[in-house]
Image (spheres, rainbow, N blue to C red):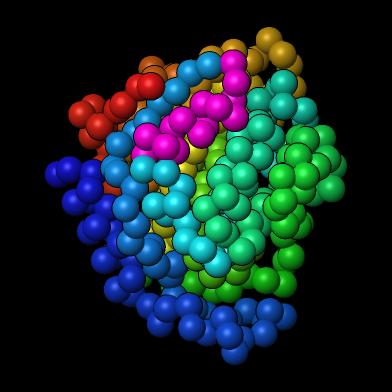
Amino acid sequence: MSGEISRRKFIKIAGAGGMGLYSFGILGCGKKKEVGPRILRQNSMNDKIVVGNGDDIRAVVRAIIEKLGGMSSLVQKGDVVAVKPNIGWTTPPELAACTNPVVVVAVVELCREAGAKKVKVFDRSCRDDRIAYKNSGIAEAARKAGADVSYVDRRRFFEVPIEKGKKLKSWPVYGEALKADVLINLPVAKVHNATGLTLSLKNLMGTAGGDRGTWHQSLHQKIADYYTVLPCDLAILDAYRVMIRNGPAGGNPNDVKLVKTIAAGTDLVALDAFAAKEFFDKTPDEVRHIKYASEFGSGDMNFSNRVVRI
């Protein structure tokens, strides 16, 4: 199936199972309330995987988004946009454990130029939030670009039934991701000791509440399960520096390869399948959550006819 058909199918599937997000206007944040899955809004971005390379990260991100159809084809005037980078670790950009702050800045700028009312940047860190936000360089850079940067508030999670889930039947999801008009995923490409790789699908664990350690039994399936209720409108993969050893935390410059590449697309399954092959020479079968997500209809891992290099 084509990527566009797969995306339309996913929009239909994601919207079919729940009560929607109307509850956010009447529910408090202090109690765990049950709401439906996030529903993708139709947009006019194309279904390609656009790949760019160069020293100027901001310019590469802008060129890629323009090739996808421009940020205004996704973000409408007055939108609240949630931007979810990887701020999981307490290391600087040179060690490639977190998303490069220049990628975050470029996306915030593009969303604001498209008319977004607010651009929210957040992640649930694996370490101390304050240190991770500071050392990664993301908090300061994103604020200067005009973003609303906040630590994840543990009270603002909502229990979401996962009707299609094979291992997760429900899970608390961060409200700021669920209720955003647009959700943009900004992962960094790196190896991971539990999943082989961490790319855009794995990056969404930073929006999950509860004890994420319990995911490590059947982790690949749980990542695919979770994505059925929190689909993203766009993912922009930071492969400027790629961690090739000792992930996800790294810590040694020798674990990092300078690749100077950014890739983006609206189909996260296709994007991850491409990135697995392009940067790590792995197939989706070797990174099983990509395969499982494709089997759910959350995207199409057959990406070969969709790659555009600029």
**Residue at the top extreme of this rendering:** 254
Front position in the image: 95 or 49 = 49
Res 276 quadrant in image: top left
Residue 184 drawn above or below residue 54: below
Q: Is residue 195 left or right of residue 157?
A: left
* Observer-nearest of 257 and 208: 257
Where is residue 69 drawn, in percent x and y?
A: 36, 43
Is residue 203 found left or right of 301 in the rendered image? right
Vertical order, 30 against 206 (above or below): below
- Say which of 165 and 90 sits in front: 90
Rendered residue at 55%/27% (across/down): 59
- The number of discs equals 0
Q: Which residues are magenta?
A: 55-68
Q: Residue at x 52, y 53 (%)?
A: 114
- Name the image quarter holding the C terminus: top left
Residue 131 in the image: state x and y as whole percent: 85, 42
The residue depicted at 76 percent of the width and 35 percent of the height is: 136
Image position of 255 with respect to 184: above or below: above
- Residue at 29%, 42% in the rendered image: 47
Residue 232 sits inside the magenta stretch: no
Of the 4 image quadrants, the one containing the N terminus is top left
In the image, taking residue 7 as reference, residue 122 lies left or right, namely right
- Asked whether the viewer can see residue 180, the reply is no
User: Would you say residue 65 sits in the magenta stretch?
Assistant: yes
Residue 39 x/y as whole percent: 39, 67
